[in-house]
Image (spheres, helix red, strand yellow):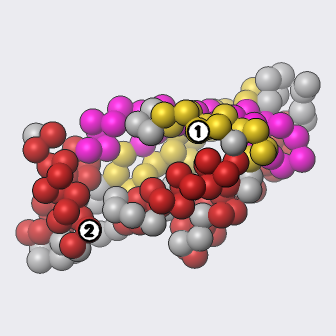
Amino acid sequence: MAWTRAELDQAFASFQNTVVECTRSGDWNAFADMFTEDVVYVEHAFGTLNGREAVRKWVTRTMTEFPGKRMTEFPANWYVIDEERGWIICEIDNPMEDPGDGSTHGAANITILHYAGDGLFSREEDAYNPMNFLAMTKAWCLAAEAAGNLPEDARAWLAKFGAMVR
């Protein structure tokens, strides 16, 4: 089924606004509610999630733990709309909060959303190189540590994953 450009633009604007609100509030339930009950969510580091409740469980856990909870926003650097397929393809930035020294740390992913109508999406795929995120997170931890600002959950992450990247 084809949707209008206006409907797809509105659905993506709503998606982005919901992510802003979830980031601000720390409550990620509204994120899961943007998907159909039978959504397929492909996340390259975590695998394929089937169903809205699986997405809810995953997003609530990952965005309330380090490093997700230290990411300050998730803006789209760019996006394109395929009206015929109902797809929205975008690059999402994932910047971290200031580690205490004024430096910036972030990594981007490509997100592919399949629109299902009524403001809901039936599929999302987040494509990225997990090693880029690991390296960025390690650099953030080292900067926070040097600034005397490394939180305990980040210290535990660094101890567990820091040796994986240079």
User: Is 103 on the left or on the right of 55, as rendered?
Assistant: left
Residue designated by label 2: 153
Tell me if label 2 and label 1 are in contact, CB under 8 Å. Answer: no
Q: Is residue 21 left or right of residue 77?
A: right
Would you say 41 lies left or right of 165 here? right
Task: Write the residue at 75% across / 26% down.
Answer: 82
Q: Which residues are magenta?
A: 108-134
* Residue name at image x 31 percent, y 44 percent: 133
Number of numbered discs present?
Answer: 2
Q: Quadrant of the N terminus?
A: top right
Answer above or below: position of 70 versus 139. Answer: below
First reached walking from the N terminus: tag 2 or tag 1: 1
Residue drawn where x is 61% and y is 60% of the image: 19
Percent from the top left, x then y, of residue 117? 88, 41
Residue drawn at (45%, 66%) of the image: 64
Q: Secondary structure at mark 1?
A: strand
**Does residue 69 appear left or right of residue 74 in this picture?**
left
Mark 1, residue position: 49
Q: Position of residue 21 (x, y in %)?
A: 63, 69
Spatial separation of the CA atoms under disc 2 and disc 1: 25 Å
31 part of magenta stretch: no
Dominant SS type (magenta)? strand
At label 1, the amino acid type is Leu
